Image (tube, rainbow, N blue to C red):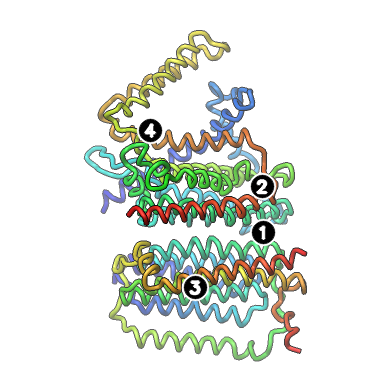
Amino acid sequence: MDSFLLISVVKAAVVFAVLMTTLAYLQWVERKVIAHIQVRPGPYRVGPHGLLQPLADVIKLLTKEDLIPPYVNKPLYLLAPFLAITMALLSISVIPFGPTIEIGGVRTWMQLTDLNIGVLFVLAVSSMGVYGIVLAGWASNNKYSLIGGLRSTAQMISYELPLSLAIASPLLISNTLSLRELVERQAGGIWSWNVFHGPFPQVFSFIIFLIAAFAETNRVPFDLPEAENELVAGFHTEYSSMKFASFFMAEYANMITVSCMATLLFLGGWVAPWPARYGSSLVPVAIFAMAGLVALYHGSRPARRRDRYSLPAFGILFLIAAAVFLLPIVQAWLLPLFWFCAKTGAILFAFMWVRGTLPRFRYDQLMGFTWKFLFPAAMLNLLVTGFLVAWVS
Amino acid sequence: MNAVPISWFLTLSAVLFVLGVAGFVFRRNIITVFMSIELMLNAVNLSFVTFSYQLKKVDGHLFTFFVMVVAAAEAAVGLAIILTVFKNRSSLNIDDVDTMKD
Amino acid sequence: MDVILFLVFAILAVACAINVVVQTHPISSALSLVGVMCSLAVLYLLLGAEFIAAAQVIVYAGAIMVLFVFVIMLLNAGAEVRKGRSVMAQTLGAPLLVALLGLMAYFVQRLFPRGDSVRFGGFTGGSALDIGRALFTTYLLPFEVTSILILIAIIGAVVLARKELE
């Protein structure tokens, strides 16, 4: 009992620390990705390649004046960002990052807790997250915030339907609601993943899930609740300092959760695309070694003077990482973690890519799209999957 | 003392139900009255699930499930009616909706 | 442990329920009701109804109550004006309610003596599998009827809302 408590506390602390760092750096990555899409360097001043920019942002947000406008509904105004960030971080607690690991004779899962109804838990928590945005919009007592809040309510209720239906069809194939078992049923390689596997490959359901996920996280092209050219900043217009940062972090935490869910439901979680005996364990080594060599090459003939030391340093770091992946002791838990992060990262990159590419929808287009196209498509997909699963078994 | 008597759950359900009735009787805002009905439904759901535990059968859960479905349908229609009432009378007071009395 | 869990969430539920009735502003009432529903979901977990607990949060707190909050915000409903309450409701209401509560509590104590008790994990038949099996065998007809009910509700809501738009 005591060791269980200790392990849980340690795991929670590790996950929290990693998640917070990821949240801060995800924003840096996003700024860089969008900058490169738009052919500009992005953050570059603070630290090498702007790597210390998240730190500077955190200090800026913490030291800003925390202003509470006099006309707001104070208790709800204060509750809203708290609710948003809590619900966004809560769902990470059931996400499994890898199989069991053994450290110092203690075996444990790379997951905070496994629920029999893990998928439903994530859905429930994310559906409670709406209240953060709605209350922020209402309590601010500002017409732009109110319109933003109303838009997000309607949008999130509407897109929850195709999202749930898209989740239901891989569950039909995997036959479980526990996220850990979900991954175990997809073990074996790329053709056992739900997106390609089974009587009916879930490609459509995967695409529907991603589209609905963009809307649920209020991302471009569905960021109507904070459309800055019509609504100033939407539901968080009146928020400043740490309260604004909470909404910001909640958005990124939701993105991470949704990407993790897509990975677990459709892409086989931490399972490698092909078995280790055909060399899948060498992929991370190759990637890191290549990145290290490229960095060393560019460091030897720097385009800018400041790159002369930073690029070789990064090159050596990447080479060390590549070497670490060759150690048999850490391979057992590092490889699943690598594949999980790689898949989640690819989906997160898609989020940023879309943001850099697509314009925003008009509001009636947004609602028409989900009710007239996405929802029937998800329904049809579920129907076909159900029939084929019943026919095969 | 590690187990909760089943009567506690049922008493809690009774308390919630009575509070729902109180809201239904005393409040004048249509939306709040509607929410009191939801509170009563929730109280009844708790009894269903408790009885399900007592009898070690899943049937109570099924009834709760059906109550939820009915509540969802009821909320959709009820709120649409409230919208129409508000549009015609620009008031949410339940005492203003008394044309049928005369 | 079970007793503490029950007491915490039961008190939370009752406090939120009182708040639903007492608050004058509908949005505060709605949020308190969300609190009631979430605490009830925890109590459902205690009773071994994991699927119902999740459905409670998803359907009740996450969909129905969001709809309520949406309508309250859309109509910009203000705080309730306390006026025109009938004398009979004022004088007789509270005593009658207390009598009703007392009656129900009496029957509960009478019918369920303290011998029966709830322990976490004492009933595990509430998983999604069991519910699905019962839903599609014993309760197939009611299930199909509710789907028609939902269809009727959708059509009704659309008809009412259309009239409002014109």
Q: Nearer the viewer, mark 2 or mark 3?
A: 3
Spot occupied by residue A329 in the image (x, y as percentages of width and height): 25, 30
Q: Where does the image place residue A82, in percent across and percent down from the top left?
A: 55, 52
Q: CA distance from mark 1 to mark 2?
A: 24 Å
Kindly indicate the quadrant of the structure image that contains residue B74: bottom right
At x 74%, y 45%, the residue is: A230
From this viewpoint, is residue A269 visible?
A: yes
Instruction: For residue A79, say whether it is visible.
Output: no
- On residue A338, the disc is 4
**Pick the front one: C150 or C69:** C150
Q: Chain under label 1?
A: A
Label 3 to label 4: alpha-carbon separation = 49 Å
Determine whether A43 is above or below C50 in the image: above
- Looking at the image, which is closer to me, A40 or A157? A157
The reply to whether dot 1 and dot 4 touch (C-beta < 8 Å) is no
Residue at 64% of width from left, 87% of height from top?
A: C90
- The image quarter in which residue B97 lies: bottom right
**Which of the labelled discs sits on residue C145, or is there none?**
3
How far, Cα to Cα, is label 2 from label 4?
35 Å
Q: Amino acid at mark 3?
A: Val
| Chain letter of the residue beneath label 3 in the structure image | C
Q: Which mark is residue C158?
A: none
Q: Earlier in the sequence, mark 1 or mark 4?
A: 1
Element class at badge 4: helix
* Left or right of A56 in this view: A259: left
Considering the numbered disc 3 on the image, is that residue within a helix, a strand or a loop? helix
Q: Which residue, given by chain and number where applicable, does mark 2 sit on?
A: A224
